[in-house]
Amino acid sequence: MEWETVIGLEVHAQLSTASKIFSGSSTRFGALPNTQANEVDMALPGSLPVMNLGAVERAIQFGLAVNATVSPRSIFARKNYFYPDLPKNYQISQFEIPVVVGGRIDFFVGETESSVNLTRAHLEEDAGKSLHENFTGPHGESSTGIDLNRAGTPLLEIVSEPEIRSAAQAVAYARALHSLVVWLGICDGNMQEGSFRVDANVSVRPKGQAEFGTRCEIKNLNSFRFLERAILHEAQRQIELIEDGGKVVQETRLYDADRDETRSMRSKEDANDYRYFPDPDLPPLVIGSDWIDRVRAAMPELPAQKRERFTRDLGLSAYDAAQLTQDRATTDYFEALVAALPQGQAKPAANWVLGELSATLNREDLSIAESRVAPAALAGLIARIIDGTISNKIARDVFAAMWEGEHEGNADAIIEARGLKQISDSGALEAIIDEVLANNQKSVDEFRSGKDKAFNALVGQVMKASKGKANPGQVSELLKAKLG
Ligand SMILES: Nc1ncnc2c1ncn2[C@@H]1O[C@H](COP(=O)(O)OP(=O)(O)OP(=O)(O)O)[C@@H](O)[C@H]1O
Ligand SMILES: [Mg+2]
Ligand SMILES: [Mg+2]
C-alpha cells in the first residue's frame, strides 16, 4: 500500500526580550542556576505576573510579517500540569484566543515553491529545567536539581496546519520560519541554547484517504537534521505498526539522536486534560490598531518584500531571490554588491554571491559577515568580467587570490601583476589559432567531415594554449572564419 505522511509543526521561538514574560528577571543564557529567578518565577505566594510589553510587541511583529490577524483582545489561560520544574503547577499560555491567528509561510523545497498555513501563534512562558547530572543527596543517593532561570522566559508558540507532507518540506518550512524570526530580530535563533525548538506531529494514512490518521508528537527537536530524522523514523514506525495489524496510539515521543529512533515518553494528554481556564491574575491583552500601526512602521523590510523587489526590479528568478533573502547578512551583502556595480548587473552579482562566494564561505566555515572579500572588492572583480578584461574562469583564480589577501584583495592589481588580461588582440589570437590548427589536423578533419564536437575541442585547445586568457567569444569567431 502507498502511504502518505501528514505533519504539523509546533515551534517554540524564544522571544529576545531582556527580561521574562511576567517578571523582571533577566533572560540571559548560561547564568549560574537560580540566579535569575525571582518570586514570580519561583511562584512564591502573593506574587503576581506583570505582562512584558516587549514580548507582545514581538508577537505583533510576527503576526504582521506572516499576514496574520493580530487579535484585538486575547486571553491568558492556565494550562495545568504537574512537573518538578513548573513551580506554579500551571503554565501561563493562551488557549481560546491567541494573540496571532492565521498567517502563512512561503518558502522553497529545493527549487519548488511551497507554502504552509499557520493555525495560530500564542504567547506563553517557558518552564524551568531539571538537572539530572552530578547531584548527590545527603545520603549519597542520586538526586535531581531544579534550575528556574529559564522559568518564565517568553515563548511564541507557532502552530502550523497539518499541511506538510514530507520530512523535507517540514525542514524547509522550519528553516524559513527560523530565518524569518531571526530576520525580524524577535528571536536569536540559537538552536543549541534552545531558543528555537520544534515539536513534530506526525501521522500516516493510505494515499487517497481523506481522514487523518492518529498523530504522535515528537517533542523538542533542536536541530533541522534531528527534525528530518525524527519524522522519517516516526512515519516508518507507524507504517510498519499498521501493516503488522497494530494501531497507532496518540502519544508524546522523544527522538533519541544517539540511537536515531523515537521512543514513547507518555501517552498524549488532550486539551481537556490540562483543565485550561482564563488566568484571573492577568487582564485580557488588548492591542489597539494604533499600537499595531506603530509596530508596522518600525518593521524592517521583510524577506518577502525584498524577494518581490529582486524579481521585479532586478530581474532575478524567484529561486535566486529566495536564496539571497535567507538571512539579512546575505541580503545586505548582495545589495551592497549590486549598488557598487553598473546598472543591470544583478544577475552576475547573484551568481557570484550564491556560487563562488558561498562555496568559499562553506569551505572555510565562515558566515558571509566574515567574508574576506568585501562587496566593493567583489564588484571590482565582476566589473572586469563585464568589460571583457578577464573571463569568468580566470576571475575565479583572481577571486581566490583576493581571498588570500594578495595585493590587498584588489582585483585590478592582481590581474596586472599576474598578467591575466584577456587576449582580445586579433593578431595575437590568430597566431595562437594558427598554431593550434597546425598541431591538431585530426580535429580539423573531423570538423570538416561534420563533427561539431571537434569545433569545441579546438576552442578548448586555443584556450589552453593561451593559458585561459583568450577571449572565448572572439576565439570562436576567428576559428569559424578560418575553418569555414
Ligand atoms: N492527524 C494529524 N497528523 C499530523 N499532524 C496533526 C494532526 N492533527 C493535528 N496535527 C498538528 O498537530 C499540531 C497540534 O498542535 P496544538 O498546539 O494545536 O495542540 P497540542 O499538540 O495538543 O498542544 P500542546 O502540545 O501545545 O499542548 C498542529 O501543528 C496540527 O497541525
Ligand atoms: Mg501546542
Ligand atoms: Mg503539541
Image (spheres, rainbow, N blue to C red):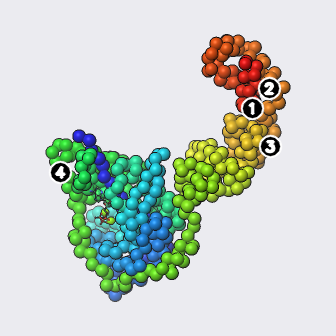
* Mark 1–mark 3 distance (CA, rounded to whole Å): 20 Å
Residue with the mark numbered 3: 413
Residue 1: percent from left, percent from top: 23, 40
Nearest-to-viewer mark from 2 and 4: 2
As helix, strand or loop, the secondary structure at mark 4 comes to loop
As helix, strand or loop, the secondary structure at mark 3 comes to helix
Residue with the mark numbered 2: 429
* Mark 1–mark 4 distance (CA, rounded to whole Å): 68 Å
Quarter of the rendering occupied by the C terminus: top right
Nearest-to-viewer mark from 1 and 3: 1
Q: Give, as a three-letter code, the residue at label 3.
A: Ala
Nearest-to-viewer mark from 1 and 4: 1
Count every numbered label the image shows and give the total: 4
Q: Give, as a three-letter code, the residue at label 2.
A: Leu
As helix, strand or loop, the secondary structure at mark 2 comes to helix
Q: Image quadrant of residue 117?
A: bottom left
Specify which label sits upstream in the sequence, 1 or 2: 2
Q: Is residue 26 above or below residue 2?
A: below
Specify which label sits upstream in the sequence, 4 or 3: 4
* Mark 2–mark 4 distance (CA, rounded to whole Å): 75 Å
As helix, strand or loop, the secondary structure at mark 1 comes to loop
Specify which label sits upstream in the sequence, 3 or 2: 3
Nearest-to-viewer mark from 4 and 3: 4
User: On the rendered structure, is 442 left or right of 154?
Assistant: right
